[in-house]
Amino acid sequence: MGHSMKRKEDARFLSGKGNYIDDIKLEGMLYMDIVRSPYAYAKIIKINTEEALKIPGVVAVITGADLKAHDLHWMPTLMSDTQMVLPTDTVMYQAQEVAAVIATSRYIARDGREAVIVDYEPMKPVMDPYKAMEPDAPVLRTDKEGQTDNHIWHWEAGDREKTDEVFANADVVVKEKMYIPRLHVVSIETCGCIADYRKVDNYLTMYMTSQAPHAIRTIIAMVTAHVGLTEEKIRVISPDIGGGFGGKVPVYPGYVIAIAVSFLTGSPIKWIEDRTENLQADSFARDYHIDVEMAGTSAGKIQATRFKVLADHGYTDASANPSKFPTGMFSIGTGSYDYDTAFMEADAVYTNKPPGGVAYRCSFRVTEAVHAIERVTDTFARKVGMDPAELRMMNFIKKEDFPWQSPTGWEYDSGDYHAGLQLAMDTVDYPALRKEQAEKREKGELMGIGICTFTEIVGAGPSKDFDILGLKMFDSAEIRVHPTGKAIARFGTKSQGQGHETTYAQIIAQELGIPAEHIQIEEGDTDTAPYGLGTYASRSTPTAGAAAVMAARKLKAKAKKIAAHLLEVSEDDLEWEIGKFFVKGAPEKAKTIQEIVFAAYTNHPQGMEAGFEATHYYDPPNLTFPSGAYICVVDIDRETAEIKVRRFVAIDDCGNIINPMIVQGQVHGGLTQGIAPAMYEELIYDDEGNILNGTLMDYLVPTAVESPKWETGHIVTPSPHHPIGAKGVGESATVGAPPAIANAIVDALSPWGVSHLEIPITPYKLWKVMKEKGILES
Amino acid sequence: MKKQITVSVNGVEHTAEVEPRLLLVHFIREDLNLTGTHIGCDTTHCGACTILLNGKSVKSCTVLAVQADGKEVSTVEGLSEPGTLNALQEGFKENHGLHCGFCTPGMLMRATEFLEKNPNPTEEEIRWGISGNLCRCTGYNNIVKAILYASAKNRGVELPSTEPEFV
């Protein structure tokens, strides 16, 4: 624990010996390419496959009608909505899958794709979610029985009446309306699979880029059981994954088509989407329209908040949220502040955009919530004439008040928000920055300081509330220690770069005293790993990491019995020191873990089960609540509106730290995925439903030049309920960075009455605001 | 109509009949089974497919295999002997310059040429030098550190600390 061990997985990646999905080749493998709709909403008149089938090497062209013959043309989404695998009559969004071409090479498959001719009758799409909610809006999901409008669901949390009452009587009420834009995760590896169905033994091996291989196996079984392919005949293998960020949680139509085609042809089918398909058709993230209000006293005490959300889910609700939480963990949005009144409501709506949404390195909608609370907190501070740091310090939940009940029903486990913000302020010398800012304002220069103090909610989750399609959100670990004292451990999670092979080994090493370099970690093969719900929402350390601890402790209990037997003493006479049991008062009488394990195979006590293995399924008693205090300093060019992030300091509290190097790496990466939506990224559609930036040519992923040099630090308040006090950290920075950056830019412009700017705050967008407000110099 | 090409890859000469439209990256990955070179986009932006062509870093998704005829190609597999790491690879490992590893081969190949041209770069020069290669995991800080480490090691000067720096 606490040791920056270099990563065990690195050598293969650095030598070009990683094993990613597109690196796998099987004998007799065919390639699939997908014909996609150019229209956002259209009737399909005819799909002409004749020319495509004439191309030598094209084996088949599969349409919705072909799948319908086997009742495989629809599939469930993770949110119990429905989604077309391939359409039989209508396309609902641009880039939707229309037909699949199967060929002997990827080039011929692409030739075939170009030769498929589809006649469409375009219809006027519904792109604006507010218009989609109007009574006279055309109903999009006519396939759903009883659906008479475009409304998907309504959700509420908190106390509406009490909140209205506090707002009615408050000294000060502020509000902001904001849009959290539609984003794409853009993992550098796109999605793909090889479906390998062997007719001879009715067995499907599905190699795929999945963050949750076990859950996917069960979902496949739900879809294919009626054709005789049941769960014991399905093996899902997630090889090395080139980044996930939530985008590799859902089931995409391409996977199902590949399975169907392999099932029908008996050949392995490889499908690797290209970047453009990935950007245009795979699950988006965010797309929340939020009205947020804060009520408080004129002295700056926060008394209540109120949130109203419109969630644009596109064609179907294909979110990756726990089933009972259609807005994910949005209700964490009351923030890090001590008040007891809040009300939130959200409505979701269908439009003619691609379906989703996934997380973009965030625990289920926490980023949207944190952006709203942290932006409106600044607006409130400005209204009451207080410094945003001072106002936050005044309103923070105190460290002695944990566990703390939030107005929307969460029990925050631990934190020290004052210490975190103080460390961030000391690091940047906050008073000096404010002084510099005042001097610069005198000279007419634009400088802004932005703060974000967020509370996250991760580690989903306790089984009483958390499931996906009924599967409870526990996670698992299995440890097998070999006779020579070396181990293999397997998990229900799946690393996509988080460094599980190192971190999990360190956890087990800490518990059992077996060196981490002698603990092999394996994930991603459903035939060998214990069942688990996978890696997303910063849940691996809180759930599977805890499972590893608990499994190791089962082994330690067994080790104690064996040690007592070997040393001929009672168990009560033994004490543990990492790596060995010794007799109290006689430390020379000891047995190392290696000697004990050897005995488990060679000399175990009569009546005891031989071997040295344990499995644990960990059901967390609560979620974990990491927090952070981020400060961003920006300088803005008054002529060009160019924004320069001068400094960005991130102080995180993720509880006890297993590997500081990996934790810091996660924070760095999260920060760059935080500046991305704050200043660069957004998926943009026109009224006709065309995506305007559907390639990396115009969807701006930050490079090393846009990404500032991050400064990071931490404070530690251990989680009281996690067995080693860890909380999870993979996504904190993505959550905390955007409001810190937006607050800094707004702060720079606040003397001109600017209280909000929509992200991404691009130079052009800022230039227009500055021109309108008379700030621009030329 | 196929065309015969001869390409030296990591010092080994390969002669093959290829379609004129075959991309160099597919020739390397599919025909030669050197899968360390990755594909991350279709518009020449991500740089995951970066290799050296006659010593110059290029994105092999935007070069035809036939254009490599008679030339020398270097890929990540040729950076060091199996089981060993060169200074740059070591820099990435020591400084946590990779997470998922997918952009890493392209970063390594780009940084290889960059350090040959600029053996003692500043941080700013490194950031511009790798700005044609996208990484979605690391936030770049540690990639910059990794390249600085390799620069120091190559020049035989004192190595910078590889401990994470915290405020």
Image: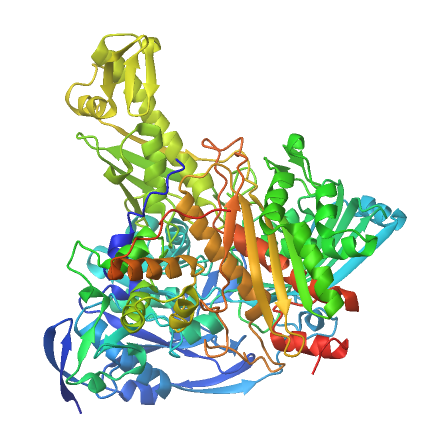
Q: Give the x, y percent position of residue A65.
A: 41, 75
Position of A167 with respect to B93 (left or right) is right
Residue located at (53% from left, 82% from top) = A39
- Where on the picture, by quarter, is residue A225? bottom left
**A366 lies above or below B31:** above
Quarter of the image with the N terminus of chain A in it: top left
**A559 lies above or below A532:** above
Residue located at (20% from left, 68% from top) = B34
Q: Nearer the viewer, residue A683 or A505?
A: A505
Q: Give the x, y percent position of residue B63.
A: 28, 83
All told, the count of numbered labels is: 0
**A313 lies above or below A416:** below
Q: Report if residue A410 is visible in the image.
A: no
Q: Nearer the viewer, residue A330 or A349?
A: A330
Residue located at (48% from left, 77% from top) = A95
Q: Nearer the viewer, residue A160 or A683?
A: A683
Position of A271 with respect to A75 (left or right) is left
Colouring? rainbow
Q: Give the x, y percent position of residue A305.
A: 76, 50
Position of A75 with respect to B105 (left or right) is right
Residue located at (40% from left, 44% from top) = A532
Position of A490 with respect to A82 (left or right) is left
Quarter of the image with the C terminus of chain A in it: bottom right
Q: Nearer the viewer, residue B138 or B143?
A: B143
Q: Give the x, y percent position of residue A38.
A: 49, 83
Q: Report if residue A392 is visible in the image.
A: yes
